Amino acid sequence: MFKVKVLNQAVLEEVLEMPMVIEAIEQVYTLKEQNQTALFPMVFHEFNPGVADMDIKSGHLKGADIFGLKLVSWFGENKDKNLPLLIGTTMIFDSKTGAPQAILNADHITGMRTGAAGAIGAKYLAKKDSKTMLMVGTGHIAQFEIAATLIAVPSIEKVLIHDPMSVERSKDYAGSIKEKLLKNFNVDKEVTFEAVENFEQAVGVSDVIITATPSRQAMIQKDWVKPGTHLSCVGADMEGKQEIDEKLFADAIVVVDDIGQAVNVGETETAFKAGIISEDKIYSEIGAVILGDKKGRTSDEDITIFDSTGIALQDLMTSKIALELADKKGLGTVIDL
Amino acid sequence: MFKVKVLNQAVLEEVLEMPMVIEAIEQVYTLKEQNQTALFPMVFHEFNPGVADMDIKSGHLKGADIFGLKLVSWFGENKDKNLPLLIGTTMIFDSKTGAPQAILNADHITGMRTGAAGAIGAKYLAKKDSKTMLMVGTGHIAQFEIAATLIAVPSIEKVLIHDPMSVERSKDYAGSIKEKLLKNFNVDKEVTFEAVENFEQAVGVSDVIITATPSRQAMIQKDWVKPGTHLSCVGADMEGKQEIDEKLFADAIVVVDDIGQAVNVGETETAFKAGIISEDKIYSEIGAVILGDKKGRTSDEDITIFDSTGIALQDLMTSKIALELADKKGLGTVIDL
């Protein structure tokens, strides 16, 4: 029998703090660059196209002696059943013995690591002294993106909020986000939050744009984007999803989390399939920029794109630090398996 | 939060009985034949070739409203660490909502469903009134194969035991198996158990042969096998494994659990790659024979082969019945995830 630790949603919300998750995700990217990781092939299955699907992402973090998987399902009809549409579970194993170590609810970890990822793109690729951030999307993930970016890019003074479906929702979100950031992330900064009334104009005045929507067509057009802008695209995680004009990829400095996933399921997919960008025109994976092996932005005029497709290694590393913190605090339960 | 049931090895050994597992695995095969199942692509990773690897098998049992996965690792160096070499964990999810339902130790389930599979091959393909069974391999899985076959093929009167490495081990096993069958499976039959001294001769007098070894080359030669013999091959579950002469596939009636897995990772692989058998020369999947859509054996002279590669659906269905039984008996623990 094996002693296996279980961390549920409540424990994870208690132990994980965004600054340490940002650090953990940077470490994942650099370990990946140093070949201290392996990503296994993704399994994807549609039970009913557009209604219900699931994927299994898995990999090995050699540098942390763990391997594991995250299974995430999306059941659109759960909204009528008072259940979350997205449900995720992570399992962690010891990569020296294969023994199961832990089972974790994946939802909060996914929010934290996805927020950290978008913010790391901005931290390493946006102009120094970026002042204005535009958040596109007001779904579950938006508060994680805003919290992480305000921590990772402290020069931000104004956050514009754009809900692609409704100005009303943008206003509601802009009015309530300050309190959420304080309550959920202990983030209390002198920052203005403003709802977007004119999307094109908002894009044109933003230094940092983060997109986190389930969109399947470009929302941001190329000629709206001013020189010097950075875009972190985190919404596209499966074939067919797209948030920004694929023509932006022709001249931008494009950095990705994983080249294979980016061209197959990421924001880069559409530009790649249209022949606008090839694998060798992708500037690099983000780990090389964090390590300083690649410069990233070369001037205040460059447009930079970070395509964050989301990789299992982020979940594994965030799970690992959550397990260490829970052990210190005596939280979580242990089962005999 | 989700209520998730946990069944460990001890609970599974208490609730699962071989006759019901045989029935469950037959049901899996017939559901598969009726397109009530989906097998997802297998993930396989070698941490260190020949030393440590893992695989993730997953699928959907529509007919039972569950989907899930089994992760199995093999760490050869665990023998020096007092840990099992093979370690498996299964997760079950509700395929109407995606909600996690259960986490189970996979080891005992794997033994039970693998034993049942080999026996089902013999039940549907061996000659009526088969008297002599030859068990090739005396590893962990052998007792499951023998127990299941004695239940599924009640005409068996003699079981020959062959350990490919040593006659001594064959003798030890033949001397102790009767007690194990009674203790672990409640199987108490008037059957003789005999160690094999001459393997070729033993093959020549056997009506049913079950092979369950990690062999990577043919142990049983074609000209040793008499007309009318049935062979259930359960050892080959990854590329390169082989137990019987590939030339046997030229004239035998070949039935498999899954055609895709059989030609890629099963006993059929070598014959398939050598051009001895093509996909359209595989007689059928076993579900068609169980349903009576395909006849299987046509005379007492046919040589029949069942290639049991092992599919995730078997683990899912066996897990499901274990969960139902544990609920009835009030066994297992429940966690909040």
Image (tube, coloured by chain):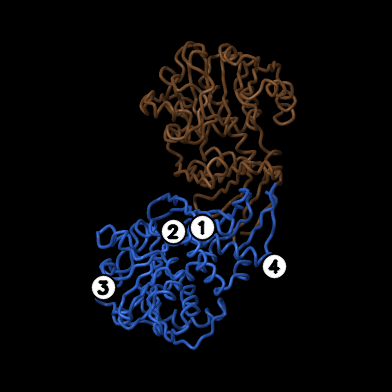
Chain colours: A blue, B brown
Which residue is label 3 attached to? A222
Circles 1 and 2 on the same chain: yes
Q: Residue A168, can we see it?
A: no
Q: Looking at the picture, how far across and down is residue A51, in whole percent?
A: 41, 55
Tell me how far mark 1 sits from mark 2, CA to CA: 37 Å
Quick one: SS at disc 3? Answer: helix
Per the image, the residue denoted by label 1 is A36
Would you say the residues marked 2 and 4 are in contact, meaning their CB atoms lie under 8 Å apart? no
**Mark toward the start of the polypeptide (2 vs 4):** 2
Marker disc for residue A328: 4
Q: Are marks 2 and 4 on the same chain?
A: yes
- Per the image, label 2 sits on a secondary structure element best described as helix
Chain bearing mark 3 = A
Residue picked out by circle 2: A76
- Residue at 45% x, 39% y is B36
Q: Quadrant of residue A332?
A: bottom right
On the same chain, marks 1 and 3? The answer is: yes
- Amino acid type for the residue under numbered disc 4: Lys
Of all chains, the one bearing label 4 is A
Marked residue nearer the N-terminal end (2 or 3): 2
Chain for disc number 1: A
Q: Which numbered disc covers residue A124? A: none
> Disc 3 marks which amino acid?
Lys
Residue at 47% x, 51% y is A40
Of discs 2 and 3, which sits in the foreground?
3
Q: Quadrant of the C terminus of chain B?
A: bottom right
Disc nearer the start of the sequence (1/4): 1
Q: Do the residues labelled 3 and 4 touch (CB within 8 Å)?
A: no
